[in-house]
Amino acid sequence: MILQRQIVLKAVVTEQLKEQLIQDLEANIQRIEAEQEELDRQTRRMMLELQRTDLNRAMQFRQQLEVEKRRQDGAKAEIQEQLDAVRGLQLGEIVIRGTVQGQVEVALGDSFSTKMARAEILLEDDIIKEINDPAPD
């Protein structure tokens, strides 16, 4: 029988990895800033129109916009914290990049906890350097 389990992806911090992470995070910040600018442009148009026609709807719209702005500001601040953390990484340090799904074969008499134990793959510049699998087939 085949079961699914999590495999942890770890990576050795290299200049290439740091550059990639920094570029990705900076792109996310720029995307949020562009969304905020577009939202501001649309807001000005909508508010002018709503203030002329329905003041109550204008107030509700403004409240909804404030909620969205706070959400975007929070997301931007979180990404900025991640960016600061990435810039502080030391070369050679090992970091967790995420998880992927993997399969493991189980049979009668196997130790379930051993088979389902945490497997890890270590990457260095996207090259697999090590596989740690406590339940080899």
Image (cartoon, rainbow, N blue to C red):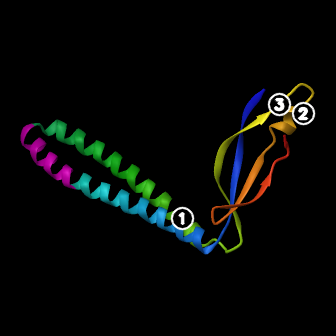
Residue at screen point 71% across, 50% down: 8
Secondary element at tag 3: loop
- The local crowd at label 3, few if under 14, some if 14 to 19, many if 20 or more residues have their Cα within 10 Å, is some
Mark number displayed over residue 106: 3
- The location of residue 122, given as percent across then percent down, is 73, 59
Residue at the image position 21 percent from the left and 41 percent from the top: 59
Determine contact: label 3, label 2, CB under 8 Å. Answer: no
Q: Residue furthest left?
A: 52
**Could you say which quadrant of the image residue 29 lies in?**
bottom left
Percent position of residue 128, x then y: 71, 59
Q: Residue at x 28, y 46 (%)?
A: 65
> Which of the two residues, 3 or 118, is positioned nearer the viewer here?
3
Disc 1 or 3, which lies upstream in sequence?
1
Which mark lies nearer to you, 3 or 2?
Answer: 3
Q: Which residues are magenta?
A: 41-53
Membership of 44 in magenta stretch: yes
Q: Which residue is mark 2?
A: 111
Nearest the eye: 94 or 56: 94
Distance between the alpha carbons at the discs numbered 3 and 2: 9 Å
